[in-house]
Image: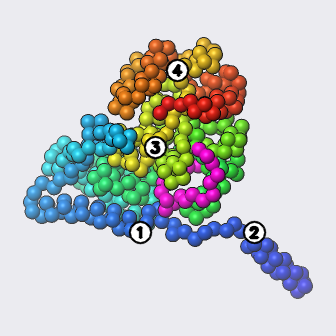
Amino acid sequence: MATKKTARKTAAKKATKKTTRKSPSRKKTTGRTVSAKRDKETTGKIEKLCTTVVKSSLAQKDPFLDIPIRSVSNMKFNHRERILEMGDNTQRRTLFNVGQARKFMQSILLSKGCRELIQADKTLSLRGMYYMSLHTIEGTNEKTFNDQSESDGILEDLEVTLDGLREELHVFAKKRGTMVGNITIRDNGDEIDCRRMGTGGYAIPSICEPSVIQFEKCEADFVLHVEKDTVWSRFNEDRFWEQHNCILTEGSGQPPRGVRRLLARLNQELGLPVYCLLDCDPWGHYIYSVIKQGSINLAFESKRMAVPEAKFIGIRAGDYDDCELSPDVRIALNERDIARAKQIADYPWFLDRKPWQIEIRKMLANGFKMEVESLITKDISYVSEVYVPERLQAADFLD
């Protein structure tokens, strides 16, 4: 009996040693989303904002917050750097104004929540922040927020007011976007080889700051960003990234901040050109605009997230004839599409670009829009084996 027990103990020890030897190596990481220095600076900004409110209250003055206006009226286009920038106009939000009191309260409430997150060195999703600050105001039947959209808008107000990024407030959004290709990264200490991600790819996180994502071995020559995961899957299955030595990304339509930040870092830090394969419609054109120049609503983040050198590789209005596509792929432009196309054509960053003016006019003259998937009518892999390779070889894209 003793002999059997001894044998079992010996086997257990061997199994433990074997498991230990096979454990993957993991570099030490601080586990921080943001550096301690930036956390200290952000905490200081929040405390300064709230101290101003307290001082006004003690002096029996109406407390206020000056919130930068996030709209096209307070946006300017930097022609030299070719990015959108926020202007200096602000809107004063006061406590004793009946129409502004609710938003004032929400701003202070979320400021408090962000300060608590930073001090605890933890993060929360946008949804989590909504619930963290949600309660019924004492003595009333009124909730602090009617829905998450209210909370999300106030958080964006805080970003611009504090001159800090959402990531610096320790808040993240839902993951949306995928990457595969010839690069190895380190995500919060874990080594990720994007060449070995199977059919699913690497899920691009909401926070892609250098403190979380570091670039290691990269052999890629460029980045191909496609609009939707359906097209991304075709390129991945055809091993396009392997044959053409690139990184393949997608943003599930309008790319979220994490994807845009990653594209900007790949371009700025590794010098990789970014090519965008998007639909031939006003929404595809707008997605390209956001990737290249930045978002009107979030112009204060353009320097960090825009890729001014990004190129539009297709699909284009002329491809209907050039690629001899079937009439079945045509999707009629509606009134909203037409109005949006004209609005985009008048953007300062498109207004001085003759090729873009020709492209938009051609689409409007056609009277229809097309999706990248329309190229499948030529052949299942036409887009990955013919269309994009030919465009790359000929350097045929819009800027």
- Residue 371 image offset from top left, x and y in percent: 56, 25
**Residue furthest out toward the bottom:** 2
Residue named by callout 1: 36
Counting other residues with Cα less than 10 Å from the Cα at mark 4, is it few (<14), some (14-19), or many (20 or more)?
A: many
Kindly report which numbered mark, 2 or 3, lies closer to the viewer in this rendering.
Answer: 3
The first of marks 2 and 1 along the sequence is 2
Q: Is residue 212 left or right of residue 348?
A: right
Judge whether residue 201 can be spotted in this image: no
Counting other residues with Cα less than 10 Å from the Cα at mark 2, is it few (<14), some (14-19), or many (20 or more)?
A: few
Identify the residue at horizontal 16%, vertical 55% (top origin).
63
Kindly report which numbered mark, 1 or 4, lies closer to the viewer in this rendering.
Answer: 4
* Callout 2: SS: helix
Q: Is residue 70 above or below residue 284?
A: below
Residue named by callout 3: 307
* Callout 4: SS: loop
- Asked whether disc 1 touches disc 4, contact meaning CB atoms under 8 Å apart, the reply is no
Kindly report which numbered mark, 2 or 1, lies closer to the viewer in this rendering.
Answer: 1
- Asked whether disc 2 touches disc 3, contact meaning CB atoms under 8 Å apart, the reply is no
Where is residue 232, by image quadrant? top right
Counting other residues with Cα less than 10 Å from the Cα at mark 1, is it few (<14), some (14-19), or many (20 or more)?
A: few
- Asked whether disc 3 touches disc 4, contact meaning CB atoms under 8 Å apart, the reply is no
Residue named by callout 2: 22
Q: Tell me the amino acid under the disc marked 2.
A: Lys
The first of marks 2 and 4 along the sequence is 2
| Separation of marks 1 and 4 at Cα, in angstroms | 50 Å
